Amino acid sequence: MFEVSPLLAIGVGAVAVGLTAAVLIVWRDLGPMARLSAPQRVALVVALAGGVLAFGLKLTVIETLTHASRDRLAPTLTEIEPAAEADGGIETGRPVWEALPSEAPAPAGNPTTPAKVALGRALFFDPALSRDGTLTCASCHDLERAGGADGRPTARGIDGRIGPRNTPTVYDAAFQARLFWDGRARSLEEQALGPIVNPIEMGADLTVVVERLKARADQVAGFAAAFGPEAPIDARRIAEALAAFERTLITADAPFDRFVRGEPSALTAQQIRGMSLFETVGCIVCHAGPGFSRASLLAPEKGSSAFRLFPSLSSDYTEKYRLTEDLGAAGGGRAGLWRVPSLRNVALTGPWFHNGSVDDLSEAVRIMATVQAGRVVTDGKVETRVAWSPETRRLTRRTPRPLAEAEVADIVAFLKALTSDRLAIEAARSARAEGM
Ligand code: HEC
Ligand code: HEC
């Protein structure tokens, strides 16, 4: 894309103004004063214009040189490991790694204000949002432990009812263009009322919840501060306040973020190897951009192609972890259709996958490498597969591309670098407290 840099714009502007001034001065002042003939005036203008153009040329040269040096600084990452010869993985071009922004964008209709955030926080922790006052949003989305999730395979809702899906984290959800495992909600506002009325989550009735909040002085004051004293408490405003609060749950403080912002020691050598494998094995094709998800507003294509078949290749894992019992957004068929989830804080949010069936992150990576990236995870020999086609009377031979267990460990190490420093400390503190 062509970008007009400020310096270049000033240069072109200065040349235009200078030339106009030269013509005017020569014609209206100098010319008549010195009684110059028309050809003499033209000659004088040309002489002056030469000076002005030389000045413009200088600016352009300076600008081009600074641009070139900026481009030279950019590929420092590839210098850490000599430019990766794509090892047969999916060709991705050279992705640029970026840190997570520290603020999430808010929709025009629901600007983030401190009063709204405070109200949203109060609602997030308010048991009045559940049918029998036993659950809050934080019961399942623990903001201190479990990285904004609940550490359970699948959610446990009202009356202890176990739901069908794993609880994803609310951290950085503000960057997702699609929410829920199957991507059925398009905004936090749209998502927020779902769990309140879901019969196996909070199981409440929205009109009852609104009446309860109207009877509470603290909540009435909170709504008045957030939306104005005239605005009634209603479901839409509950959703807006919850969404505004969730937009503040951003974790831009992972070692990965520090690394790409210019702190080379933030990642270990193993994590940098894992980062490179993440690219060459093709994880980055789906888990793209600083949100590590194609469904992210930050992904190169801004949340388009947010869905993927999972499992997209057949393997023994499908049966072992019941990966196709729930088909997500797919109407039917062999594999489910799922939103590509973010991998931020993924080391804290296990067990993994939509059904929480895998409780070991290395196993989750093996599964992904096998069924999504077409690799064979092995430490031994890789057997060539030969297929015979009776129609064409040809043999086709395929040697699966192996991924060593040590490389799986490298990728896992990299995924751990996506954990927020603050959440890692909280998680360690609560693990110690539980151990006591
Ligand atoms: C009983 C546990 C439970 C409670 C209580 C709960 N949630 Fe959830 N939450 C879940 C589960 C499970 C999902 C995933 C459901 C799915 O994908 O079908 C989810 C998904 C989400 C998501 C989407 C995250 C993403 O990346 O897609 C957000 C945001 C969220 N919940 C916010 C809230 C808010 C706000 C509340 C309180 C009003 C709340 N949750 C209450 C279990 C819960
Ligand atoms: C073709 C797209 C695609 C590729 C390639 C891909 N993933 Fe995924 N990934 C997904 C989808 C879709 C899911 C959600 C699966 C589900 O619904 O359970 C997922 C889920 C995950 C999860 C579990 C997240 C959670 O919160 O439970 C991890 C971890 C993961 N991927 C890591 C990787 C790694 C590492 C690679 C490279 C080896 C990779 N992925 C390659 C699409 C992909």
Image: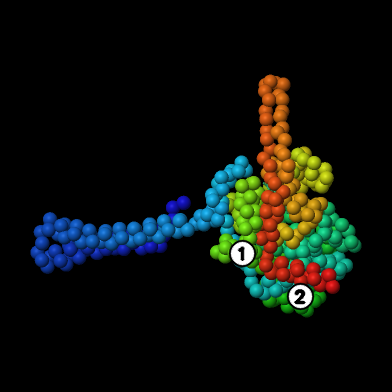
Disc on res. 165? none
- Asked which colour scheme the image uses, the reply is rainbow
Q: Which residue was labeled with disc 2?
A: 219
Q: Which residue was labeled with disc 1?
A: 266
Residue 161 falls in image quadrant: bottom right
Q: Residue furthest right?
A: 159
- Choose between 42 and 335: the one closer to the eye: 335
The local secondary structure at tag 1 comes to: helix
Q: In this view, does 8 lie to the left or right of 241?
A: left
The local secondary structure at tag 2 comes to: helix
Q: Residue furthest front?
A: 380
Residue 286 % position (x, y): 65, 49
What residue appears at the point 82 percent right and 47 percent down from the top-left corner? Answer: 321
Residue 222 falls in image quadrant: bottom right
What residue appears at the point 70 percent right and 74 percent down from the top-left corner? Answer: 118
In primary-sequence order, the first of circles 2 and 1 is: 2
Residue 72 falls in image quadrant: bottom left
Looking at the picture, does residue 174 appear above or below residue 321?
below
In the rendered structure, which amino acid carries the disc numbered 1? Ala
Q: In which quarter of the image is the C terminus?
A: bottom right
Distance between the alpha carbons at the discs numbered 2 and 1: 43 Å
Q: In this view, does 354 lie to the left or right of 396?
A: right
In the rendered structure, which amino acid carries the disc numbered 2? Gln
